[in-house]
Image: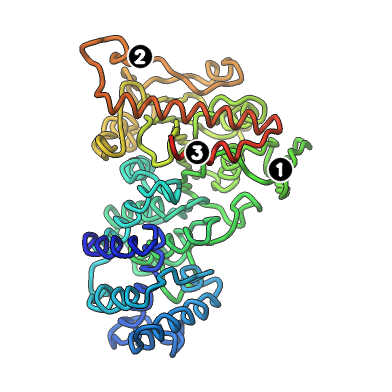
Amino acid sequence: MVAKLWNYCNVLRDNGLSTIEYVEQLSFLLFLKMADEIASDPFAESDLTEIVPKGYDWQSLVSKKGKELEAHYRDILTELATHPGTTLGTIFAKAQNRITEPALLEKLVVDLIGKQNWTIEGTDLKGDAYEGLLARGAEDTKTGAGQYFTPRALIDAMVEVTRPTPDDTITDPACGTGGFLIAAHSYIRAHHMQDLSREQRLDLGQGKIFGKELVTGTARLAAMNLLLHGIGTSEGTSLIDGGKDALATKPSRHATLVLANPPFGKKSAITVIGTDGKSEKEDISYDRDDFRATTTNKQLNFVQHIMSLTAIDGRAAVVLPDNVLFEGGAGEKIRRRLLHEFDLHTILRLPTGIFYAGGVKANVLFFDKKTPRADRKPNTTKLWVYDFRTAKHFTLKTKALRRPDLNEFVEAYAPDKPRSERVESERFKSFTYEELIARDKVNLDITWMKDPALDAADSLLPPEVIAQEIVEDLQAALSEFAAIAEALGGDVSAVAEDVLPES
């Protein structure tokens, strides 16, 4: 199915559509076709005839041809965008027709979508096919779509060690195309479905799993992705809050499990005012009394937001760039709070070459939210750091990250055992709270291993891997210099846009 969908994508790319634009148009048409199938099924539990108004449904579309088809398609997109708050409204928000050739639109409607019965396909097949397209879309570096895509191997490992349960409320405040939410749902289905009551099953698709995404177009892909994976309903309240900046307001509800890979990059037109009374001014103001430190660094603010978003006794697993571990000022203040008020128990140092966005050096922080201790002692007693970066070399094209690559980390994490039973190894070391707090600026960017390939001439890496890692290092360095220049008042947006993608 992915191959079939991809073949049509190639046809439309010749007409000027990017991969993500194609997936977006596919989402609109798939929704209409699936709604038509369900509405005409006498045994279906859901009646979609009211949610997709007559005259703007699939049947009205397939009854037309040529320019009349294109004109009516535009009318449908305009009409269906006027249903805010529902899955329908999220998918069609600000929808536009990107297919300028009526013949190509007709080919897509009649030959690809129209000939397939999408609702009788299993949710795994439909969902995996759609996610396969999103993964290919992430490879389209010119559109920047990769910034919304976290490697599935990493997502699966994070979900496996955090062990989602049917009792969890699960969220991602910067959900991109919904990868974390879908993986958590899949884990619950695989490990708990036989024990779930009908009410618990319904709860999973009616609000216990939810996300937020700033970019409207990406939110629609997430909503469709969840729907195709059997999460939520077409006519129900949208599980994806699209077009909303997660950092703008305090969380209105909390989650027992937060999984996230917030957007990287410092550029953010905001003023942040924390309880320390300071402010860093740009164009938009965030007045968050739950933020203890003032900074315009987006990642640091996401850390503070996730601290607030996580329920007491809840847990979080968050992908964050290296600067969160060592940046001074607000960064140090946030790390001190994280160690004292939360149990920051594990850091996974990630290798380069696994993200579509270049120059990314990142980590996964695993922490639990605890009630303050009566004796005022810190909730973090020991931090375990797993070095999956040193002597690990990946590239997107020749050696992509696979789930088995993370088996040793999952085993070392020992999710089914008390942390007191964890065992140190060459890659897995523990550090006490006293050791961490004594480090300069509470720097948590901790390294101890050395790459043998850097010393041994007979173990040199392939030239393409060396070249890729040089590019990654240069891009990471440029990002850091850009952040410094921006902090000093310089405008580096043109440099970042012109240089980073080409590198």
Along the line of sight, which residue is nearer the eye, 314 or 471?
471
Between marks 3 and 2, how big is the CA–CA gap? 31 Å
Name the front one of labels 3 and 1: 1
The image shows residue 370 at horizontal and vertical percentages of: 55, 38
The image shows residue 322 at horizontal and vertical percentages of: 50, 29
Label 3 sits on residue: 368
Label 2 sits on residue: 450
Identify the amino acid type marked 1.
Answer: Val
The image shows residue 40 at horizontal and vertical percentages of: 31, 87
Identify the amino acid type marked 3.
Answer: Asp
Identify the amino acid type marked 2.
Answer: Lys
Image check: 159 left or right of 50?
A: left
Label 1 sits on residue: 272
Image check: 297 left or right of 239?
A: right
Between marks 1 and 2, how big is the CA–CA gap? 39 Å
**Alpha-carbon neighbours of circle 2 within 10 Å: few (<14), some, or many (≥20)?**
few
Residue 421 showing in the rendered view: no
Instruction: Determine whether 179 is above or below 329 in the image.
Output: below
